[in-house]
Amino acid sequence: MKASTIRSALEGHGWIGLFISIPLFIVFWAGSLTLFYPELKAWSVLPHTLPHTEFRSVSDTLPLSEVVDTALSEYDVDTQERMFVVLPTDTLPLYELYLPVKQNEADHTELTSLYVDPANGKTVAPIDSFHLADFLYGLHIDLNLPLGDHIVGIITLFFTVVIFTGLIVQFKKLITHFFFYRGSKATQRYQLTDMHNVVGVMSLPYTFMYALTGLMFNLGLISQIVTLLFVYDGDRTALLNDSGFPKITESYAGIEREMPDLDALVASWEEEQHAKAHSLRLTNYGDDNALIRIIGQHETSFSQRIDMTYRVRENAFTTELNPSERNAFADGTRFLYALHFGHFAGLDVRVVFFILGLAVCGLIIVGNMLWLNKFQNNRSISQRFKRNISALTLGGCAGIIPATATAFLLERTLAASLDERALIVEAAFFLVYGLSVVAAFFTKNRLKMISVTVLVSGLILALLTFVDVIFHSQAIMQYFNAGYKNLFSVSFTCLSFSCLLLWLGLSLLKKGELTRNTVTNH
């Protein structure tokens, strides 16, 4: 390969990587945490539900039909609208109910989401109060910004270019220098270069898979919008019908009909379809034209979703509502989604993906440091621009650690009944993150700021551990003994990261003191 081609690829790799570095860092950081979305969700909710939860055998829990009827009697639900029921899982032993509740205004409903105890049918807490897992998921897919999914799509496109340009630069040395690291005797620039190359090559299959699947998700969304506007003139229903996603509707008859036993219906469906049901959609519930849609996962395929609709008056899953041929486009999309979020794997592979995700975050930081070192003495680039890039790298990357730790702490300590609880957690995250970025523009000692940021993050997580031990240890151990170990696992992980961050922060402070003393003595 020509030297000029390699130089061009290197320039493109550096500049493109530089401009997408901060949002890409956030996407990978949040995505790494989102790999444990079910565990984080359970960790947020369960300690606040212990007073209402009794651990009984499955035969002692209330029938699902009774749980739904209880909710309908407590709330003024518009049964002509669809209701959603998410079934308990091995991670979260609660029902999730999404009910279209009538408001004071005529013909106006508002979706009310509730956690319901399957043992007694009591409402435990509003789902919207516990938003940490969904907030992190939003950071990953759209940065929690308006039109953020399009922004992430463009970033993913450029990230794919960065991967290919990096391959061009390293192609000749890909095998011979697979794990080439010159160690502490080399200069800082060579150490950073080796670190960047080693992590980049070792994480290549991981990053390529994420870039490819992320690109397909986001560009697919953009192409759908273009098709909807220019081909279907904004007719979303026609687009969904032609794509194999027809919206199943049924008019309200106004004639009461007894509903089937939902537990028996789900059990029969699971046996026939060799699947595990995870949610129900109830339309016109209690009416002659009632529909019950069951959605679940095939037992032998990690990406094949089974989605069927039951017509109550015919007592059957009619062929009219359930096409005999599967939707290839939907199956392909779900396969990519399952691959992207590690649904094909157990906890062990997700842990590996988590470590690789954090390694890519480090790769991004090192890449920016290399750029800054390379152009340190380049007078064609203004000093202000270089200082801004340095500050953005410092604040934009380091600041997300205390921001995340703060969000975890507030998610644990704020009362479940507190109004706007989720908003407080999110606002605290952005406040800490914003202050960290601003502080980076005014700091003169970057190493000291990094050490202080890491120490503060460690202290916040240590406080979180203290809160768990004092206020939630009984709940954690009771759920642990009942087989729900996620609370303990997440809390123990937070404790481990607290110890790691405190050790790292103290080491960096000590290193900074030694460097300062050396400079003073000379």
Image (cartoon, helix red, strand yellow):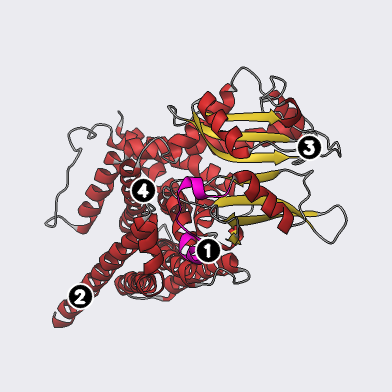
- The front one of 153 and 484 is 484
Indicate the secondary structure of the residue bearing disc 2: helix
Give how far across and how far down residue 22 sits, in percent: 45, 56
The vertical placement of 459 against 288, above or below, is: below
Lower sequence index among marks 2 and 1? 1
Q: Which residue is mark 1?
A: 52
- The front one of 227 and 522 is 227
Q: Could you tell whether 521 is left or right of 49 in the image? A: left
Q: Residue at x 13, y 82 (%)?
A: 521
Q: Amino acid at mark 3?
A: Arg
Q: Is there a contact, CB below 8 Å, between mark 2 and mark 1? A: no
Q: Residue farthest to the bottom?
A: 520
Give how far across and how far down residue 460 sits, in percent: 38, 72
Lower sequence index among marks 4 and 3? 3
Q: Which residue is mark 2?
A: 510
Give, as a single range, the part of the protein colored magenta.
46-62
Q: Is residue 5 visible?
A: yes
Position of the N terminus by quadrant: top left
Q: Which mark is residue 357?
A: 4
Lower sequence index among marks 4 and 2? 4
Q: Is there a contact, CB below 8 Å, between mark 4 and mark 2? A: no
Indicate the secondary structure of the residue bearing disc 3: loop
- Of circles 3 and 2, the one toward us is 3
